[in-house]
Amino acid sequence: MKSELLLVLALSLCVSSKPLSERKTYNKLLLISFDGFRWDYDLDVDTPNLDQLVEEGVKAKYINPPAITMTSPSHFTTITGRWIEDHGVVHNLMFNVTTGLRLTHKATLKKSEWWDNGALPLWITAQNQGLKTASFFYPGGGANYSGQAVDRSLVGYHGQPYDNETDWRQNIDTVMGWFTKEDFDFVTLYYGEPDNVGHNEGPETPARRKIIEQIDRTIGYLREAIHKNGLTDHLNVILTSDHGMTTIKNATEVNEIKLSNYMNLLNLSRFDLLDYGGFGMITPKEGKEQEVYNALKNAHPNLKVYKKDEIPEHFHIGKHERIQPIVLLADLGFNINSKIILHINKGDHGFSNEEMDMKMFFRAFGPDFRNNFLAEPFDSVSIYPLMCKLLGVVPEANNGSLSDTKGMLVDVGGRIQVSFTLLLLMIVILTFI
Ligand SMILES: [Zn+2]
């Protein structure tokens, strides 16, 4: 009798050990991006809610942004799983070398011609596989891809308040309603902080620590909202960002970079993207490429200069046609100024993705994530295959790897392990009956 009972128990436990990929229904997914949340921002602030997530979810020590550490390129890498040279969103500014047009990041948000370069973002792929998706202020969510729009899209606008805590909570309530009342499967939610404070005040300031406390309270509010809406067992959440932030060095401590000290921009340059942090591009006038290169190559000890075909392959930017013939990358904390040094930002990003100050934050929790799991650092391209796995979506071709992230999941191995623990417990109990 005991052995029969054991067999039935063992069989029932095996049935409950189905791997994620064989389930017919998948949990919903919320991706939240806090712009400019550097990987270590929670280490010098009291963050009880984020601390609780370490116990009740997954934390990566940090993750690596793509090589142009800017908002639009990095967000689009997360949502497509493609390197920048494959998705083509190479800058925050939309530009046209021929007409001289430059549009601000906000002004690009509905410009499909800037975003739609052949790499399909997850919203569209998921929709084509029968899911319902939405974007709340997430960069790229307001464009059309091969003529197709995201099912529901709210787009960021000039002058929108970044740090209003009441708005932040209302946005969470709105998203909860989309999941519960309208049965959305996948939602991306974007917050403009702590990037805004990082630029205006600098990353090592009380103002930045204060906004991290506000973000922590918002995470607490989110977890309560998930619980109140009955989504605890049905919604996975990924919290991440797009790049870090570093303090900008100024003339009192360093020799700042001003390109007009080394070359005549007016005579040699047809178009440029400069005065935008630590990354810049120059389109030389016809026949002037070598002259520009020679003028800048060894001009300043903290400035690296590449011809397009010299860009290191591991940057994964050089192949795209929007990358201009001369690419400039400054050392951490150095702005690339053209003719005037303005000192608008106290903090900035755009520097090498190998710098620790540029690394991104990553947390995750929900029914498909393990508890108390510390993940090794990985590239942000690998968030995409993780999201596809969670949603049961067949991914497009991408540069990410599920092997970077699958250890976070309550996978086949994890479930069987739990089942065997239960089995052992049963054997012990039955032995003593
Ligand atoms: Zn950003």
Image (cartoon, rainbow, N blue to C red):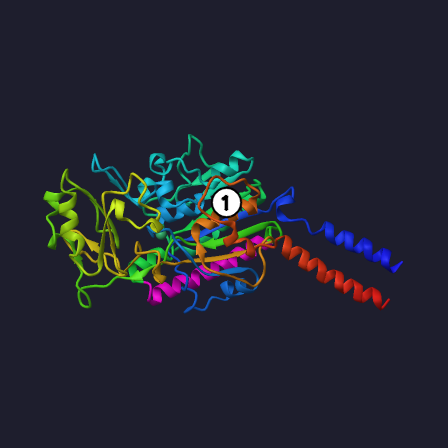
142 w.r.t. 372: above or below: above
Q: Nearer the viewer, residue 175 or 290?
A: 290
The quarter holding residue 110 reads top left
Q: Position of residue 298 (x, y in %)?
A: 17, 56
Task: Give the camera-side residue of 291 and 90.
Answer: 291
Q: Quadrant of the C terminus?
A: bottom right
Q: Nearer the viewer, residue 182 or 11?
A: 11
Going by the picture, which residue comes out furthest to the right? 1
Mark 1 vs ligand 1: CB below 8 Å = no
Judged from the image, the secondary structure of the residue bearing numbered disc 1 is strand
- Splitting the image into 4 quarters, where does residue 193 fall? bottom left
Q: Whole-percent x and y of residue 383? A: 47, 50
> Residue at 37% of width from left, 51% of height from top?
66
Q: Is residue 134 magenta?
A: no
Main SS, magenta region, reads helix
Residue at 80% in and 63% down: 427
Quadrant of the snapshot with the N terminus: bottom right
53 left or right, relative to 41:
right
| Total numbered circles | 1
In the orientation shown, which residue stands out farthest toward the top? Answer: 147
Per the image, the residue denoted by label 1 is 187
Q: Amino acid at mark 1?
A: Val
Q: Position of residue 375 (x, y in %)?
A: 51, 60
Q: Residues within 10 Å of mark 1 (few under 14, many from 20)?
A: many
- The magenta span reads 203-227
